Amino acid sequence: MPASFLHGVEVIEVPNGPVPVTVVKSAVIGLVGTAPAWAVASPLVAAALDTPTLVSSALDAAAFGPVVRGYSIPYALTAIQAQGAGQAIVVNVFDPTIHFTAIAATAFTFNTQGTINLGHMGVSSVVVTSNPAGTTYVANTDYTLDAVNGVVTLVPAGSGGHIAPSASVLIAFRYADPSKVVDADVIGAITGGVYTGMQVFQTTYGILGFFPKILIAPGYSQDATVAAALTAMATKVRAMALIDSPPATSAAAAITNRGVVGSSFATSSSRTILCYPQETFFDMGIVPTGVTLNASGLPLTSQFNANAVAPYSQWVAGAMAAKDLAQGYWWSPSNTEVDGMLGPDVQLYASILDASSDTNNLNAAGIVTVFNAFGTGLRVWGNRSAAYPTATTPDNFISVRRTMDVIEESVELAMLQFIDQPISNALIDAILASANAFIRSLIQRGALVAGAASFNPAENPSAQIAGGQLVFDIDVMPPPPAERITFEAFIDVTLLQQLGNTSPITVAAGAVS
């Protein structure tokens, strides 16, 4: 009761009893990579550099630029959204002011339309001088620049320009070059309270109210250093890290790499999903060196329009997120059809009947692969994380590990309402009632086989309680996936006794036989 004096009556409303536990988001992908924001903005800018950006639609994805070869984010978002559902928290690490290639002063000649094609898209720091050098021309006075397409157009003398038609000039410039992005850019760091690269994922709960639960870095996670950092980040935010193999890796080599120190596959983390192999797809991406000029001197971009190879993780991530939303996070990602792929970049023998098939051997080594048989379409294939076969506990199943993550984080976040309340039997009962109501709801939905929360006095001695600490137990069992189904078939000769014992057929009156 308050200590202030009152000669009268008052009512104090005291919240008591259980509270609902809100399930954390599981179908959120954390994507770190490169984006060609220069393709939608001039002068060149970075697309939300090292900033977590929530992408929920194609409109959101457009902020990261079109699909341009060499840039990973637009390709990954296309693969994710092709699965039909799911959100992504995107972190772009490409900065055109840092990641560029410089071209020294090179001779170019204006064509009859008064334009020059520099041969690269996404240009900056353009300097145009006379040839031979001596006069430096002024942008927007002597010439104009289309930085997106890399096209220089002279300003006619009648409009104040000083460059003669069909003149030869020297041009120095820089062009955006995603190949300059290194592993350290993707991994990032925390410097002076500033988060960069994948470290930004640690800030997303404070900014968006949730963490990404499926982490990918397509094109980079095949490097062991990025793979290790992605796994470490998954541990921090209770997520799964999807790691790729290099392109054109044989099934035998992928299995061997499980034991090769320095390989991205050499891990036994229950938070790592090994995605093999890379996949072919029809690539309609813009070729950043393929701009041509039409008869009027206007730029025309060129699309690749041919089959290409890309990391499998982006499709697996999209399939996982879509399945979470459609069926639940307690469902295994395995046996989920994937759209947008043409097939693996190496030949794989897939069979559910042959234990020596490539797909079975890969799964037995803790590698998630792709399955394709007659009429099945391409499917994610494999239930287990990289913890298998080192660990055989139930949480080596991807779905079990993810279900435990959801339960643990959901309960933790719900307990904020009870933190710092006076310890009493009523508080203990309220906490137990909240947790058990949540567990019962999960059992009813099929996310758990059984489970309960309990308070054991033996785990809570008086000295510990006097220190403000309470310990509760949560015992649950998520449903493991039906990875193997066995029938025992018997040839029962006694069934031959039924031969010759057929009963006469009785035809009802009036029936036509």
Image (spheres, rainbow, N blue to C red):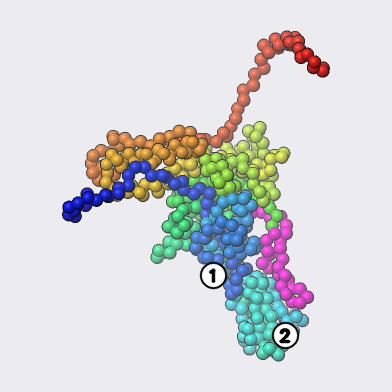
Residue underneath mark 1: 98
What separation in Å lies between label 2 and label 1 (alpha carbons)?
A: 32 Å
Compared across the picture, whether 130 is left or right of 423 comes to right
* Residue 47 visible to an observer of this rendering: yes
Q: Residue at x 42, y 45 (%)?
A: 21
* Residue 223 visible to an observer of this rendering: no
The part of the chain drawn in magenta is 284-311
Compared across the picture, whether 58 is left or right of 108 comes to left
The one nearer the camera, 290 or 214, is 214
Amino acid carrying label 2: it is Ala
Numbered disc 1: secondary structure: loop
**Mark number, residue 167:** 2
Q: Residue at x 39, y 47 (%)?
A: 414
Determine crowd level at label 2: few under 14, some 14-19, many 20+ residues with C-alpha closer than 10 A: some
Indicate the position of residue 224 as horizontal and vertical percent values.
53, 52
Which image quadrant is residue 172 in?
A: bottom right
Within the magenta stretch, is there residue 99?
Answer: no
Relative to 163, residue 442 above or below: above
